[in-house]
Image (tube, rainbow, N blue to C red):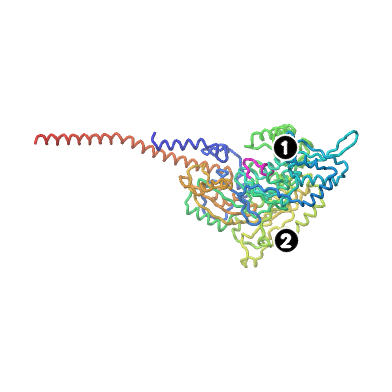
Amino acid sequence: MNKNNKHKASWRGRQKYNSNKRSGAGRDWKNPTKHSANRVCLREDQVGITEYVSDGEGFTGVVKSRFSDFHVNEIDQNGQVLILNDLSVPKPAVETFDEEKLAEARTKFAEVITAEIWDKLNDLAKMKAKDSTAQPIDILVTSLDKTNRGELHELLKQIYGTNLTSSTINQINNSIEERIIRVAKPKGNSRNQERTRWTFPGEYVHFLVYKENMETGEAASRLASRLGMHPSHVNYCGTKDKRAKTTQKFCIKRRSPSQILNAGINSMRIGNFSFSNDVLKLGDLKGNRFRIALRHVNGDEEIIQKALENLRDNGFINYFGLQRFGNNADIPTYEIGVALLKADYKTVAELILKPRANDLPFMDEVRKKWWTERDSAAAAAMFIPNEFIEKKLLNGLAKYGENDYSTALRGIPRNMLLLYPHAFQSLVFNRIASQRIKEFGLKLMAGDLVYRNKEEMDEDIVENNDTENSNENLEAVEGNDETKETVTKTEESIFKRKVKALTEEDIASGNHSLFDVVLPLPGHDITYPFNIVSSWYEDILAEYGLSSEKLRHKVKTFAMAGAYRKLLIRPTEFTWKFRKYSSPEETLIASDWERINGKAESIENGEEKGDLKALLLDFCLPPAVYATMLLRELLKTDTSAEQQATVESNEMSKARSSQQARESEDDVKIESNENNEPKIEKRKLEADENDVNEAELKEKRSKTS
């Protein structure tokens, strides 16, 4: 085989072998749409995303071809980008004790702990737990009251630390009740660490979690499960994309770093431990840093450069991205939100459980069974995991009755239910933002709203960020009406004072730009713009049978007070570069974990070769801003999964055609060379024969003369 052919054949073989091992396993890079064909996915225009800031040309580029093309690092409130780079595990502080006080305590308990018992305790402490001679030692303490017994436990703990454990036991001896303190070696699975005094410098352990292709909620649930606690006790500042490599801060109360580290799983790395007396809450961050690779970039580099500069200077519309609305066009989450806001609980339950196109196979069976039979217990029994919202709803219907929808919904965690009305608020915001840009462009209008404090960031749409209550169910949240009313009144005054309407004089002063303008998320306690935009809100709410006043729900959990959100966002620290690569599986961005393992240099500074081109982006955004909306402004195309799969399929087809054309050219050259070789040899032989004949002729002439 020709050397060139051999090389190409081996390259194709490696591609085939690795196709199931790449990030996003199971996707065939040669046919990326085969698993998503005929999917009924939401399009951007269906959730109000229609306009662009710039009229410039877009270009072709694939978003999230692999989940390793999308990296997110949280930015803390001090402006520090959080990077996993320290895997050390802090040890508890070693307590030092006053020898004089220890001597006094020994003297105090000399009647119950003799010198002989002290010797036995010292010997036991030196033994290994599995030593068969390491038998418990009983100390008779019937003469001591509860306070003194507690002091004795503390004395033993101070002297022997975690080498020995002590517990008080009641026993009957000759019909007489006795109390003893039993001192023993800790068992391998004992709760000894929990019994040990907490000596770390803070009640809460803060740490970074690096995860791959995993939702933040799933990471929190898995940590909680392995630590034996409720998921609501694992706190974090914000949720991150699933199909990505992300680093963010978590915190847990009174669990040692070693326990937390052991609770991690393969797709999760934990490190950068610190301690604080403050708990993390949703929104306790300044933003996120994104590093994104757009693959299969196709377009004139001058046009792309101009598009990047426009984005850097003019920003993008701060739409809520498609992730906010679910992944199915048949039943978008905002429709469930509308039913919930209208207290139509039957419709809420039916929309959650209704069969839909392209569902997960097992979920499709569950939905169809319930939809046709209305047997919630039987449908719930088909689930294995319990975290699905459908499972929780079915359990509620089975428990309280097939028609008691409102009570059944109370079994769903509050934060899950609130996703639905928040999705409706997001839809309204998107539609208003599009209409505002379409009709009035990028100019300021009298009556536009701006924050009174110009430095203030956007408010999170979640009105109650108390993570301790984030997973409480509806029934628990409804409990304290008096407290809720007080909170609502406080929020009213805060929201009303938060913004002001621009006047013509404000606009003429030049002190404001469209980047200062905020649009409300609709609610019963919000200030609307003092111009025509206000009527647009009324029209859209009426379209769904709602009004601002009706958002003051009779169930306070679902009462939407409202919030504000910036209309335009401009990325900060925005840089970019083009990158050549040869294989769709080639890693283009080094993750925190790859940097720790010394692989960053080869990824970032390795030889760039190949016919494929990528665009690497690096930028920072405020909290709750969607990077996909920045990419949409840049590419001037729909960012839905369906559209991106189509683009990738088309670009891969072009790449295959180009590769096949090059291979055909190589084959023609090889064939041409092979056909020419006999002719060359023939000419060479003829030349050699002529040389021989000429030599013979000269020799004959020489002899004749």
Residue 54 or residue 621, whichever sits in front: 621
Which is more toward the observer, 552 or 694?
694
Q: Which residue is mark 1?
A: 129
Going from N to C along the chain, the mark reached first, 2 or 1, is 1
Q: Where is mark 2, residue-wise?
A: 497
Q: Position of 554 compared to 643: left or right?
A: right
The residue drawn where x is 63% and y is 43% is: 268
Residue that protrudes farthest toward the left in the picture: 705
Q: Position of residue 23 (x, y in %)?
A: 56, 41
Residue span colored magenta: 259-269
Mark 2 residue crowding within 10 angstroms, few (<14) / some (14–19) / many (20+):
few
Q: Write the residue at 75% across / 57% down.
A: 492
Q: Residue furthest front?
A: 115
Compared across the picture, whether 2 is left or right of 367 comes to: left
Q: Amino acid at mark 1?
A: Ala
Q: Residue at x 49, y 40 (%)?
A: 653
Q: CA distance from mark 2 to mark 1?
A: 65 Å
Marking on residue 417? none
Residue 351 in sight from this viewpoint: no
Q: Nearer the viewer, residue 14 or 679?
A: 14
Q: In the displayed structure, does residue 570 sit left or right of residue 651?
A: right
Mark 1 and mark 2 in contact (Cβ < 8 Å)?
A: no
